[in-house]
Image (tube, helix red, strand yellow):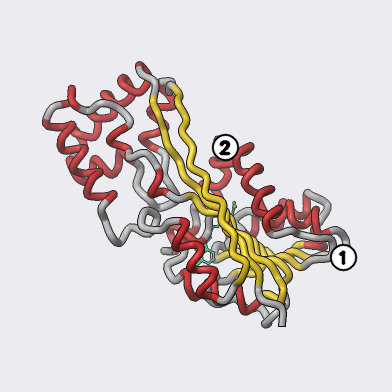
Amino acid sequence: MHASESSRWSEWLAEQAVQVGHQLERTRDAVLAHAAVRAGDTVLDLGAGTGLVALAAADRVGPRGRVIGSDLDADCLRVLVAQAGRSQLPNRVRVVQADAAALPLADSCIDVVAARSVLAFIADRRTAMREAFRVLRPGGRISCFEPINRYLTRHHTLVDLAPLGSLGEAISACFDAIYADPDEPLLTFDERDLVHLLEDAGLVEVGLNLIVTWHRFRLSEEEARQWLTQRGSPGRPSVTELVASRLGRSAAERYARYFVEAASRQTTSLRRGSAFVWGRKPPV
Ligand SMILES: C[S@@+](CC[C@H](N)C(=O)[O-])C[C@H]1O[C@@H](n2cnc3c(N)ncnc32)[C@H](O)[C@@H]1O
């Protein structure tokens, strides 16, 4: 991750909280439930961002428990500390600025490692998972959640591109190439990789809950515009920027006008995938 990307995570997470806050809370609660967080536990929220999981964990561990939020991004950690202060739980929460692949924590000091939407962004996931294993105490638990973008409906199939003629064909070819890119970590990573990642690190009793859902909805014109300009994560191009970079600005503008009109006129079907995966470090 580049420094310029990292500085935008806190803003991106704030936008997500506004747009899909309830969904994030449900995911957070499921991550903590799979980890069976108990009173008195020490929880590490790996890639904690601005503290979605860490702050809820602080509530669950009670006055004898502790939560460590670790993240590469100092700006996110500043927001996390401020939120912990407002939540009346500041004494239970501390933060550590660190790469998940090199945690400045002692061996076997953590009861629970939780990570929501983090592994997909880490280049060296195997090392990060081995680090999570190292800091877990024997018998400690790990619980992760990741969107599985391989199941996501491909952008160029959301609306019928045939009326756009050669521009529609160019848009389809452009997205086909992106989805076929073997180096695109957000697309080449799925639930089997997650299970193997945990098992290869030495975790046992690895469980998986893969969720693939369809939603049918009609976008308003404003929502359709937002669809084209939003980013999957900070530093990544929006659909409009992608099309402009590959087919030119005027093609991107023409496509945006068509997409907004078509998506707001018809019902759109969208498939999404996500996975919860959890495991335990063998007791000695
Ligand atoms: C999608 S956000 C999720 C944040 C938080 N877990 C949540 O549920 O809101 C991804 C987070 O992973 C962090 N991150 C990315 N690569 C990292 C790495 N190598 N080590 C530690 N954190 C990393 C980012 O800084 C960002 O805060």
Nearer to us in this view, 107 or 258: 107
Q: Residue furthest right?
A: 63
Residue 138, picture quadrant: bottom right
Tag 2 secondary structure = helix
**Residue furthest front as drawn:** 205
3D distance between C-alphas at marks 1 and 2: 32 Å
Q: Is residue 99 above or below residue 271?
A: below
Residue 70 in view (yes/no)? no
Mark 1 lies within 8 Å of ligand 1 (Cβ measured): no
Residue for point 15% across, 32% down: 167
Q: Is residue 80 left or right of residue 270?
A: right
Which mark is drawn over residue 20? 2
Task: Write down which quadrant ligand 1 falls in.
Answer: bottom right
Q: Residue pushed farthest left?
A: 166
Q: Residues within 10 Å of mark 1 (few under 14, many from 20)?
A: few
Q: Is residue 133 above or below residue 26?
A: below
- From the top left corner, tell me how far across and down residue 129 is, in percent: 54, 71
Measured from the top left, where is residue 11 in percent x and y? 54, 47
Residue shown at the point (67%, 74%) measured from the top left = 136
User: Which numbered disc covers residue 24?
Assistant: none
Tell me the crowding category of disc 2: few under 14, some 14 to 19, or many 20 or more residues within 10 angstroms, Cα based: few
Tag 1: residue type? Arg
> Circle 1 — which element?
loop
Q: Residue drawn at (28%, 36%), measured in percent from left and top?
A: 156
Q: Position of residue 135 (x, y in %)?
A: 65, 77
